[in-house]
């Protein structure tokens, strides 16, 4: 299988490094496995005989790969040439237009190319269009990394709870807000101070609205609802209250009663993300930049999974999706 | 596929009920799926055209099924006749001899029959012998329910963390001791009082040694180590300290410092189960009769899964194994 990575930011770079580390294992599954293309926003490198993973792993920016870097070369060119079997889409998220990822994914699926994506935008906007396209072309569109990053939510549902009907999903789905709320819980910090520290540490953007107003979590609820509960949710269907109004006083009061205030997303018929009191002893009550997802099911009862919702750990989910495709080939 | 259930105790009965509820879904996967045999310790019912699931679901003891119940009929007879494709083994656990489960599993595998088991005994004693037998006969021996019951530990490892190398596993693997320790943590109860209440509620046996001396947890560590880390552990390899000596004073001191004392099993090169201080904010620190398993991996970092380690929820794991076999047929 010939793989291409679109997007050479933190996730794209981390993935290339992980592929290099795991290349023997990947070649055991598919002896023809190779990375044939990597693209950034301005161009890319493409080679049918496979790229040099060693070199790709140490460069900071893609043009440093060497003279093979071609300006204006796009993954769309590679798709048109039939040069790819799996496309990993890791461009920046845009939840208004889905671009550029949406076009890349759509074109890949239309070309009969399997897609692994870490990008919420295209799925929030066009989940069912893309899934139907994948199904029509008999290829896979896997997106484990889009919700709770390293946590295997979708494969847990598909592979480990195959007889269970999932009735409700709740989760702490945004690491930035959980970092801020944990700071408030443990240190009595004000929201403003905790946010400032999150920004200084690089956990929160200069415009933190995407995280703290629950937009990121709401996007994840749309994907969870559609992929696991079979809903036809769009972003507008999610009731959304952020954490700006959580005060140190409210947090202290909650703490005194054995609770923490957390930004909790819930998906059933009416998806909602809002600050909620969570008993400190509940498995969902995780701290720092951890994420947690809790399934309520008809057989297993409650199953909670906890782990890293961002960072280099995301490559675990991307590689698991890639391997699922290699194995089903 | 023709399925038989061996053992008609709580788990066997719960499974039959769950199969009845999910029969349409199972027949979508395999339109010839049927339950052809159920056996208790004294006899069984066997019918090549399939048993009446409605009737099986409402009876308390197998002889009540009707005159079809045959004394001294054993699953071994059914195996000899080639009447079964999947055997679900749910007889009582015996970790000294593995019997009667060990003989049933061995004979099933020798006969080329897939096995799903909830029984730790045979696996603790003969993990590698049985796995090699399964591999030689090209059938599956799945045992999701043997560790942390409803929690999908082994399928999480096999299906959701396929690129990850698991470096260490730690877990709260015994619901009875966790119930007792939680009682001590939350109510300041003494060990003796908490044990007595666990016995009154049916969580602990009259002879509670199997749970409170860590024997049950040690068995689970052997299976985890062998199945996930590829070790050749036996029961004797596990260093084992139970919870008899945990005092209310020690628990109160731990609590004051933000910890709880938990019976924690750890598997790496040196498996060990012993009471440990766990930070109350750590995902592993679950309470009541919950179980939790924490994987440390090279890519995903830490992944924790939390849920029910006993009870009717166990059928989720058994059915997931059954479905995995139906899908790979």
Image (cartoon, coloured by chain):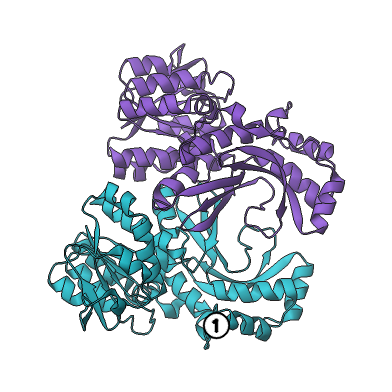
Chain colours: A cyan, B purple
The residue at which mark 1 appears reads as A213
Residue closest to the eye, A285 or A295: A285
| Neighbour tally class for label 1: few under 14, some 14-19, many 20 plus, Cα within 10 Å | some
Horizontal and vertical percent position of residue A320: 37, 56
Q: Quadrant of the N terminus of chain B?
A: top left
Q: Quadrant of the C terminus of chain B?
A: top left
Residue closest to the eye, B213 or A284: B213
Horizontal and vertical percent position of residue A193: 68, 84
The image quadrant of residue A191 is bottom right
Q: Chain of mark 1?
A: A
Horizontal and vertical percent position of residue A195: 62, 83
Q: How many marks?
A: 1
Regarding residue B85, the answer to whether it shows in the image is no
Q: Which residue sits furthest right?
A: B249
Whether residue B63 is situated above or below residue B114 in the rendered picture: above
The image quadrant of residue B211 is top right
Q: At 35% across and 18% down in the image, what residue appears?
A: B79
Residue closest to the eye, B188 or B273: B273
Assign a secondary structure to mark 1: loop
Regarding residue B280, the answer to whether it shows in the image is yes
Q: Which residue sits furthest left?
A: A81
Q: At 34% across and 59% down in the image, what residue appears?
A: A20
The image quadrant of residue A108 is bottom left
Whether residue B192 is situated above or below residue B93 in the rendered picture: below
Q: Which residue sits furthest bottom?
A: A207
């Amino acid at each position: 299988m010939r793989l291409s990575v679109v997007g050479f930011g933190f996730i794209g770079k981390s993935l290339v490094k992980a592929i290099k580390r795991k290349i023997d294992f990947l070649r055991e599954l598919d002896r023809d496995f190779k990375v044939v293309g990597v693209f950034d926003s301005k161009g890319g490198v493409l080679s049918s005989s496979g790229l040099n993973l060693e070199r790709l792993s140490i460069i900071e920016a893609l043009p440093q790969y060497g003279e093979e870097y071609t300006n204006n070369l796009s993954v769309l060119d590679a798709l048109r040439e039939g040069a790819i079997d799996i496309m990993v889409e890791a461009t920046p998220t845009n939840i208004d237009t889905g671009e550029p990822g949406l076009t890349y994914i759509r074109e890949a699926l239309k070309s009969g190319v399997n897609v692994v994506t870490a990008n919420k935008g295209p799925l929030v906007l066009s989940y069912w269009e893309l899934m139907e396209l994948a199904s029509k072309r008999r290829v896979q569109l896997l997106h484990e990394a889009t919700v709770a990053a390293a946590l295997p939510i979708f494969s847990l549902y598909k592979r480990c709870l195959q007889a269970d009907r999932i009735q409700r999903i709740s989760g702490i789905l945004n690491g930035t807000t959980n970092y801020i709320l944990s700071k408030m819980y443990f240190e009595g910090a004000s929201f403003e101070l905790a946010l400032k520290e999150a920004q200084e540490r690089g956990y929160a953007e200069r415009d933190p609205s995407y995280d703290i107003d629950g937009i990121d979590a709401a996007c994840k609820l749309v994907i969870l609802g559609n992929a696991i509960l079979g809903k036809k949710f769009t972003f507008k269907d999610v009731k959304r209250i952020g954490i700006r109004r959580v005060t140190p006083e409210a947090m202290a009061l909650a703490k005194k009663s054995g609770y923490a205030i957390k930004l909790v997303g819930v998906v059933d018929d009416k998806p909602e993300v809002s600050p909620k009191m969570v008993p400190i002893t509940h498995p969902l009550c995780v701290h720092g930049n951890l994420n947690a997802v809790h399934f309520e099911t008809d057989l297993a009862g409650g199953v909670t999974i906890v782990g890293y919702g961002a960072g280099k750990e995301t490559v675990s989910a991307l590689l698991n999706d890639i391997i699922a495709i290699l194995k089903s080939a």
